[in-house]
Amino acid sequence: MTIAQIGIIGGSGLYKMESLKDVEELEVQTPFGSPSDALILGTLGETRVAFLARHGRNHTLLPSELPFRANIYAMKQLGVEYLISASAVGSLKEEAKPLDMVVPDQFIDRTKNRISTFFGEGIVAHITFGEPICKNLASVVADAIATLTEGNASLNLPDVSLHRGGTYVCMEGPAFSTKAESNLYRSWGATVIGMTNLPEAKLAREAEIAYATLALVTDYDCWHPDHDSVTVEMVIGNLHKNAVNAQKVIQETVKRLTENPPASDAHSALKYAILTNLDKAPAATKEKLGLLLNKYL
Ligand SMILES: CSC[C@H]1O[C@H](OP(=O)(O)O)[C@H](O)[C@@H]1O
Ligand SMILES: Nc1ncnc2[nH]cnc12
């Protein structure tokens, strides 16, 4: 049963969606434990959506402590097919300035301590991850931003520029990068840096959920000669403005997704990914992963 087709994970600064109506709190349990917080069901425009505060509503979880599997599995349990992540990021490029929005299309993994698969315990799967973000969902997000930032019709976000595409470096944290690291990532051509989205994108794909990132720039990390190195104070200063902007973008994105839900490769990501003969796989694992595997059994 689908309770919500669209999910939203709110990152640093976005702990609540003010415009949700008919709100219900769901304490969801999964075979991978509890999510970061209760899932909030609510109506945005005409559409029922599921919202989760990634670090908990009081921001109590470090990036390395996030229950990524439970978060994504909980979204799957509610029937989510499109998942939008709103995340604070540092900018690695001059042109992506604080308050700008980036819709990345690639990741570089610099995490060290994350579990980013549902598989194991007798069932092996290798998803294709060359295109880690759903292109069609990302286009809907980017088009929604464009409507709010460009042209004369709706100058709701006049100071914000949109950057379509780009590479998100996902670091372990919680300390921010050294200058040498920041410059290394710049030499790799990366666009933004954060600590959370890569494990989510992997797990969402394993769960056959289309995933896209709305990256909200808060700082220039520590590489920029004319800007102070990132501090939490600096990030927070921009987070509040970003959170207001992000909600406008999400509302517009949800409207567009409802009118015209796009096709996504992610929705069949497991079709050729499972190596194990499921007839011979351990019953307990099949049961645990039932939600992901049922259509292939
Ligand atoms: C508060 S700055 C560092 C923190 O913010 C980002 O979190 P999120 O992706 O959940 O918005 C970054 O990844 C770090 O976790
Ligand atoms: N500079 C930065 N590095 C890592 N994560 C961030 N989140 C916001 N700014 C960041």
Image (spheres, rainbow, N blue to C red):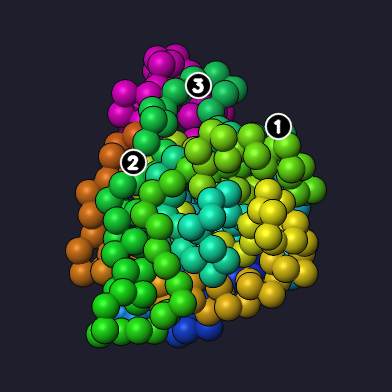
Instruction: Residue under label 1, please give it.
Output: 112
Mark 1 Cβ and ligand 2 under 8 Å apart: no
Q: Which of marks 1 and 3 is nearer the N terminus?
A: 1
The answer to whether residue 42 is seen in the rendering is no
User: Vertically, is 234 above or below 93?
Assistant: below
Characterize the local packing of mark 3: few (<14), some (14-19) or many (20 or more) Cα atoms within 10 angstroms.
some
Q: How far apart are marks 2 and 3 (CA)?
A: 20 Å
Q: Which quadrant is the N terminus positioned in?
A: bottom left
Q: Where is residue 61 in the image (x, y as percent from the top left)?
A: 75, 56
Characterize the local packing of mark 2: few (<14), some (14-19) or many (20 or more) Cα atoms within 10 angstroms.
many
Which dot marks residue 266? 2
At mark 3, the secondary structure is: loop
Instruction: Residue under label 3, please give it.
Output: 123
Q: Which of marks 1 and 2 is nearer the N terminus?
A: 1
Q: Where is residue 10 in the image (x, y as percent from the top left)?
A: 56, 64
Q: Where is residue 137 in the image (x, y as percent from the top left)?
A: 32, 54
Characterize the local packing of mark 1: few (<14), some (14-19) or many (20 or more) Cα atoms within 10 angstroms.
few
Q: Which of these two is toward me, 17 or 41?
A: 17
Q: What residue type is labelled 1?
A: Lys
Residue at the image point whose x is 30% and y is 84% from the top: 154
Q: Which amino acid does label 2 sit on?
A: Ala
The answer to whether residue 131 is seen in the rendering is yes
Q: Quadrant of residue 88?
A: bottom right
Q: What stretch is highlighted in magenta?
A: 270-297
As for residue 283 lying within the magenta part, the answer is: yes
